[in-house]
């Protein structure tokens, strides 16, 4: 079986996937090739092709398009923060979730062994197939349409990922801000600890020179401190406006 024959045999699922994506391919062979895992081509030597080169291409396109999108959306954000945010959006875990959101696993061509071992839900396979899908759109339509395709699917996730990263990195960023301006760091104070031992709720404040800059609540002391630091950064940002 060659690629053309596989496209003919799978016209229905390919058409269904196009509807999910909101994009119709000029060359349907590109979409089909993006769905061919190496285990499938290994079991069918006469086929001889898989999605790995499209994955390579899609990875590069994603980095450029997401980087450009973040630069436009957050022109004030520091380079390091932009890099971390882009990494959070294009890492295997997030790409696999993006693939699950469109049920990409249903459309993959896997070898029998890989299929039997739950390959359709493996994060590594799903993330790679998603990159290959982006590569296929790029090959089919060029950069600008591929970037628009990426923006459609990634834009809803950007704000949430940004908040996650800001909270996760808040303590170190607050330390940097205060050290740079005042050559002093903040202090953290555990205000309250409540709830049963298996479900504790911690309330923490961050102070600087005796003034409370922010307060945070969470199920762990560390997370409460991060949330307090994030609140402090928000206050300092408003004061600087």
Image (cartoon, grey):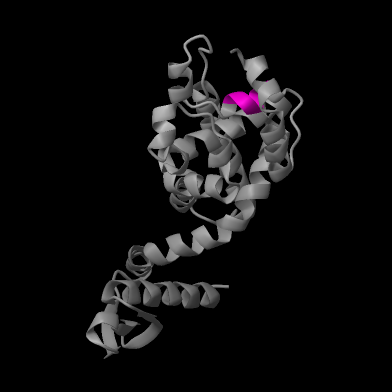
Image check: 131 left or right of 116? Answer: right
Question: From where the camera sits, is residue 24 visible?
Answer: yes
Question: From where the camera sits, is residue 86 visible?
Answer: no
Give me the residue at 60% from left, 12% from top: 2
x, y percentage for residue 199? 29, 82
x, y percentage for residue 203? 33, 85
> Magenta part of the protein: which range?
29-33
Give me the residue at 73% from left, 28% from top: 141
Residue 95 to residue 56: above or below: below
Give me the residue at 58% from left, 13% from top: 1
Residue 74 to residue 65: above or below: below
Image check: 116 left or right of 62? Answer: left
| Residue 89 colored in magenta in the image | no
Q: Residue furthest top?
A: 46
x, y percentage for residue 177? 39, 66
Residue 37 to residue 4: above or below: below
Residue 65 to residue 238: above or below: above
Q: Nearer the viewer, residue 52 or 5?
A: 5
């Amino acid at each position: 079986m060659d690629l053309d024959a596989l496209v003919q045999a799978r016209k229905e699922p390919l058409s269904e996937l196009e509807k999910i994506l909101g994009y119709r391919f000029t060359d349907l062979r590109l979409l089909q090739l993006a769905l061919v895992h190496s285990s499938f081509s290994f079991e069918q030597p006469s086929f001889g092709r898989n999605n790995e080169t499209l994955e390579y291409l899609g990875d590069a396109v994603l980095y450029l398009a997401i980087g450009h999108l973040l630069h436009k959306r957050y022109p004030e954000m520091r380079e390091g923060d932009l890099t971390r945010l882009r990494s959070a959006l294009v890492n295997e875990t997030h790409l696999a979730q993006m693939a699950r959101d469109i049920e990409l696993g249903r459309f993959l061509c896997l070898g029998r062994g890989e299929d039997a071992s739950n390959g359709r839900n493996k994060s590594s396979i799903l993330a790679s197939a998603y990159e290959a899908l982006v590569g296929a759109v790029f090959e089919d339509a060029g950069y600008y349409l591929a970037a628009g395709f990426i923006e459609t699917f990634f834009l809803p996730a950007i704000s949430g990922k940004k908040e996650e990263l800001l909270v996760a990195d808040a303590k170190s960023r607050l330390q940097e801000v205060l050290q740079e301006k005042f050559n002093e760091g903040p202090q953290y104070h555990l205000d309250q600890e409540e709830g049963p031992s298996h479900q504790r709720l911690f309330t923490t404040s961050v102070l600087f020179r005796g003034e409370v800059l922010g307060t945070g609540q969470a199920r762990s002391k560390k997370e409460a401190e991060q949330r307090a630091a994030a609140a402090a950064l928000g206050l300092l940002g408003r004061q600087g406006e």
